[in-house]
Amino acid sequence: MLDLMQVLKAAKGLPVTDTASRLTGMKAAAPVIYGWHVDPSVSDPAQAVTYLADAVGKTPAAMGEDSFSYGSWKSAFFMPRPCMLGYDGKVAYYLDPYDYSRKLDGTPSDIANADFEGNAMMEWGLIWYKFEAGNSAGEGDFYVSDRQVDSSYKCWCNIDANGNISPHFYTAIYNGTGTSKLRSLSGIALTAANGANKMTYSQALSKAVANDPEDMTIWGVDLYSDWQLIAALLVLMGKSLDMQTVFGKGLSVTSEAELSECVTGSLNDKGLFFGDTSGYDSAVKVFGMENRWSPLYRHLSGISTVSGVDSARVKLTYGTSDGSSVTGFANVQPQNYINTQVSLPSTETQSNAFIKKMTFGSFGIMPSETNGSPDTYYCDRLSYWGYESPGYFMIGGTNNNKEGRNGAFSFDEINSVVSTWTIGAALSCKPLCGVS
């Protein structure tokens, strides 16, 4: 019987299923390929998206008044599952997706146990994908598959710190909390005293890395490559660029005192998706993760600018297998990141600038034109001020004025010393190949 880890180590970068088939002499099944296309000339965020490849004919997902409809996507190969993940990157056990307070066997879980040696996380499988530019500005396609269809498909989210392909990567179920170590646990109020906010990027990353065992580099904060893939998968499921209308608007809080009333785990019994598409009184949950947007901004690793109004620079992996020339995310060195050649539009003279067009490329998608609105095009806000080097970025947004300034594509720049009550962080984990 083939060992998946040995297959991955022996054929890094090759399609896993195809590799296994070659070694066993069995014929591989056809790959599953889902895709979508964006027409930038269409302002209606739902009409702008067209399904491609195996997605054609699929029924989109959507949040109803009281429950979520998966449409055709409930059993999609990319759907993650909730688990308790040890500090070493090994799954201790999986959670009941409809009641995180319990394990799959019905016994109580450790989602609220601060003594548990790990965190509550979503486990993602091996996902291959690509973004491709179209013929006109803002036009583009996204494709995702269960294997590497050809060399243009990459699995950046599954690359570990050593440059190897790991079969899983993990994102946090909850907003990060913890005073000395960033955790993902239920039942924690989102206060500065609990370590939920008022962190600079460096402080947040340092607390995330504190989860690492001595001989491993696996923990961090939200990563650019993960953010891009997850946002694209949401577009795929919802067949729309308007995430708030499909999945939920997210909580609106107007003060630090109001934020302190928010407690992680409010949606533990709501399945993998839940939200309110008409109001701002419920947290939003997508792919099992609470508050993917609102009520807090979240620090993001893997994207920066060099100086002033500049083209965006990205880093897709911890090491240099992505083509960057610097290792790690701690000392941000955007001059050694990948230059996307996309100049972010300055929003210094615009009030609540909303993304109108994105540029597609091997780096993902990047905002390239604003002057949209909360109800048209991408429906999410860009805030780019051209700070001096390096520029730091956040995702998710906050919706404190109920102006739609949050969402899956919401994208904000800050400088290195900003640490207000509106800014938090969340964990990510890339287990070393052969560990998880």
Image (spheres, rainbow, N blue to C red):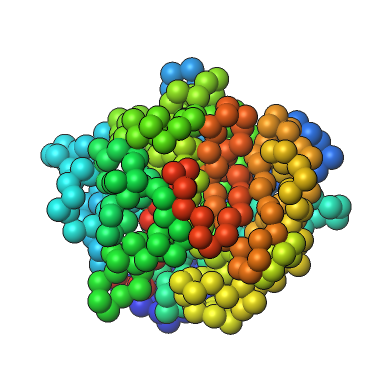
Q: Percent x, y for residue 330?
A: 46, 72
Q: Percent x, y for residue 204?
A: 40, 59
Could you tell me which quadrant the N terminus lies in? bottom left
Residue at left offset 70%, top offset 59% = 386
Q: Is residue 290 visible?
A: yes
Side (left or right) of 14 relative to 283:
right
Side (left or right) of 429 relative to 407:
left
Residue 191 found in image quarter: top left
State the residue in front, 148 or 202: 202
Residue at left offset 19%, top offset 58% = 117
Q: Percent x, y for residue 49?
A: 71, 39
State the residue in front, 91 or 370: 370
Residue 243 found in image quarter: top right
Total labels: the figure holds 0
Residue at left offset 27%, top offset 40% = 188
State the residue in front, 211 or 87: 211
Residue at left offset 53%, top offset 62% = 416
